[in-house]
Image: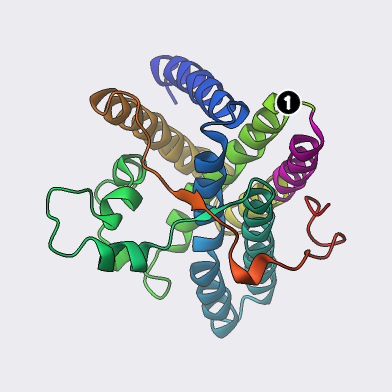
Amino acid sequence: MNLFTHVLHILGSGAVAFVSARSLRDPLTRPNTLAGLQLAESGSVPFLEALSARAAAEGDTWLAEKLAKHASDENRHGQIFAHALKQLNKQVIDFKSLAQAQEGKPKEAKPDDRRRSPFFEAYFEGYSQETFKPQNIDWTVFMASTYILELDASRDFVRMAHALPDDPVSVNIRKGMLSVAQDETGHAAYLREALERRLSPAAVTAVIDEWRTRKVNAMLAMVSNLLQKGGKMPELARDGVPIEMTAEPDAASTPVAA
């Protein structure tokens, strides 16, 4: 990674950390931020489970076990953020119901538009959706791209957790986020090890630098998109508590449980 990209990485990371921390600290934007985190964490579970099955079929037991653990962790993270929303009497928007309600209303934002990410469009520029299916994705691409995301997420979650105020509900949410951050650190570690098992040290450095550069470009694309929208984020949370969340989650497996 060249000096210019390194400087952009530092500046971009600082800006994203500031915005994400502020959005979580502000009671008005906190539900939307938590909803986005829930969608991101839960949404990766089927993909990771499919990759685990593929690794097992290819005879890589070590990788299959790591991916299965990763999927389990992400599922738990989704539950953590769902319970955090529950404590605020909120839940993630039901995109299917919203799509049905918006039929015949072309001027309103479609649910798919809310989930479309300029960040990931830039991060994975040049790759088709077909190449990112679990059965097709190149292992090195998966490992390096996800390593960068997990490594940065582990730090972002810590910053966001400490930005929360000190009221009882926020303290409870903070504990859950710090638990998530610890898991993300572990994910980054196994992905780095997976790369080192397959590539030479020089090749590992090169592919990580490539995806670090992509991350910088993706952050710039995300910031540009936000500026175009006047800083307005898509609404991802709504009032109410989902029926499946009416029971308290297991405190041992879900740290945000009261």
Q: How is the image coloured?
A: rainbow
Along the line of sight, the residue nearer the viewer: 203 or 158: 158
Residue 104 belongs to magenta span: no
Q: Note whether residue 148 is visible.
A: no
For the point 65% across and 31% down, which residue is it? 160
Query: What span is in magenta?
Result: 167-183
For the point 50% across and 55% down, which residue is it? 92
Main SS type for the magenta part? Answer: helix
Percent across and percent down for residue 94 are 42, 63
Q: Note whether residue 79 is visible.
A: yes
Percent across and percent down for residue 76 are 69, 62
Residue bearing mark 1 = 165
Percent across and percent down for residue 247 are 75, 68
Whether 174 is drawn above or below 159: the answer is below
Along the line of sight, the residue nearer the viewer: 59 or 164: 164
For the point 73% across and 27% down, which residue is it? 162
Residue 177 belongs to magenta span: yes
Percent across and percent down for residue 130 are 28, 68
- The quarter holding residue 194 reads bottom right
Whether 208 is drawn above or below 245: the answer is above
